[in-house]
Image (cartoon, rainbow, N blue to C red):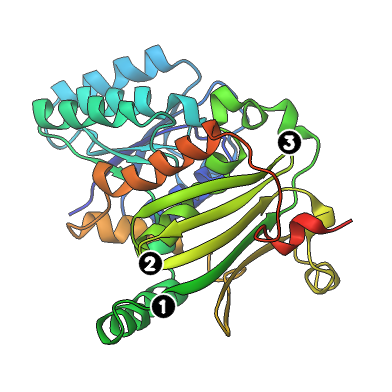
Amino acid sequence: MKKNFAMLGASGFVAPRHMKAINSLGHTLKAACDPYDGVGILDRYFPDCRFFTEVERFDRYLERCRRQGQSEQIDYLSICSPNYLHDAHCRLAIRSGAAAICEKPLVISPWNLDQLSALEEEHQQKVYTVLQLRLHDSVKALKEKLLIQQAQQPKQRTQIELTYITRRGQWYHQSWKGNPNKSGTLAMNIGIHFFDMLLWLFGEVKSQRVHLREDNKVGGVLTLANADVRWLLSIDANDLPAESVAQGNHAYRALKMGDDFFDFSTGFDDLHTKVYKDILAGGGYGIEDARPAIELVHQIRHHELNAIDEEAHPLIFQG
C-alpha cells in the first residue's frame, strides 16, 4: 500500500538519499520544508511535492492532511534537518499523527530520548532512527562471524582500530555543523554511526578515554564488553591515506580487527533505501536502539582530555 511522506530539511546533504528511497519503493512525498529554497532535487523525484520555507505553514498543512482522513494523512515524516532540531521535529511528527524517520543523531542530549519515549506512548506513534551501518552487507557479515566466535570463546577480547577520515572544507566550520551546540561536536556529527556500529558488534561500554580533541579531529580509546578499541575521526584531508588520495577517494572508513581488515569506504549508496524498506516491512530501529551511542558520544564530548600516550591511535602521532 502506497504511503504518504513529508520531509523536513529538504535542501540538506542527506535529503536526496531519503527522496530516492521513498521514490524507489513506490511511495509519495506530499510535502517538504526547508528555509533554503534551492531544492531543485525535488524535480527529479517528486515534481508535484508541496514545498514550504516556513515550518509553521508546513505544520498547518500536515494538520490539514490529518483532518482529511486516512488517504491524505501523512504516514511518515522524514527528518533531515540540523542535529539540534531533530527532537523538536520528531515531536512535530508525532503530534501530526505521523511516524518519524529521523537522521542521525536522533538527539544530541540523552535526556531528550526520555521525552520522545513518553510522546510515543502518549500518541501511539513511533520514532525511527537511521542506523544504516547495521544494514551494510560487510557489517552484517561481521556481526554473524562475531556471534559465532563469541559463542565458542566467550572470554576472548578483540583488538580494534577504527578510522574514519572524510574531507571537509572551511565551510564546515562556518555552518551549523561547526557549532558544537548545534551539531553535538565532530564525534556526534560524523562519528555517531560508527560508535553505534561498534556497540552493536562488541557490546556495551565499560570505559572510555579521549586523547585528542581538535577542531578537525578527535580520537581516543574504548573498552567494550568484548573489545578494546582505538578510534580516530577526522575531517582533515591531510589525514587521508596516500593510496586513497591517489584513487580519488575523499573518504576513508576502515576497521582493523586483529589480522582482519574491513574497508567500509564503499557500499553506502543504497543503505537508506534498505532502512526505509526495513521500516515499512515492520522492522526499523527506534529510540532505545539509538540510546547507547548517544550516551557514549555525550560522555566523549564532556570527558576530560587525557594525555596522549602510546595507546592512542597511530595517526595521532603523524607530523
Of residues 114 and 306, which is closer to you in this image?
306
Q: Left or right: where does residue 71 sit relative to residue 279?
A: left
Q: Which tag, 1 or 3, sits closer to the chain's start?
A: 1
Query: Residues at badges 1 and 3 in contact (C-beta under 8 Å)?
Result: no
Q: Left or right: where does residue 153 sit relative to residue 2?
A: right
Q: Amino acid at mark 3?
A: Asp
Disc 1 and disc 3: Cα gap in Å?
32 Å
Q: Quadrant of residue 249?
A: bottom right
Q: Amino acid at mark 1?
A: Leu
**How many C-alpha atoms fall within 10 Å of the one at disc 1: few (<14), some, or many (≥20)?**
few
Whether residue 110 is visible here, answered yes or no, is yes
Residue 54 vs 236, above or below: the answer is: above
Label 1: element kind: helix
Q: Residue at label 2?
A: 201
Q: Which tag, 2 or 3, sits closer to the chain's start?
A: 2
Label 3: element kind: loop
State the residue at coordinates (75%, 60%): 315
Q: Position of residue 19 (x, y in %)?
A: 45, 48
Check the picture and name the quadrant holding the C terminus. bottom right
Disc 2 and disc 3: Cα gap in Å?
29 Å
Q: Position of residue 78 (x, y in %)?
A: 37, 39
Q: Left or right: where does residue 117 sit relative to residue 181?
A: left
Q: Position of residue 169 (x, y in %)?
A: 79, 41
Which mark is drawn over residue 193? none
State the residue at coordinates (17%, 54%): 1
Query: Residues at badges 2 and 1 in contact (C-beta under 8 Å)?
Result: yes
Q: Amino acid at mark 2?
A: Leu
Whether residue 272 is visible here, answered yes or no, is no
Q: Which tag, 2 or 1, sits closer to the chain's start?
A: 1
Q: Residue at label 1?
A: 142
Q: Residue at label 3?
A: 215
Of residues 5 and 277, which is closer to you in this image?
277
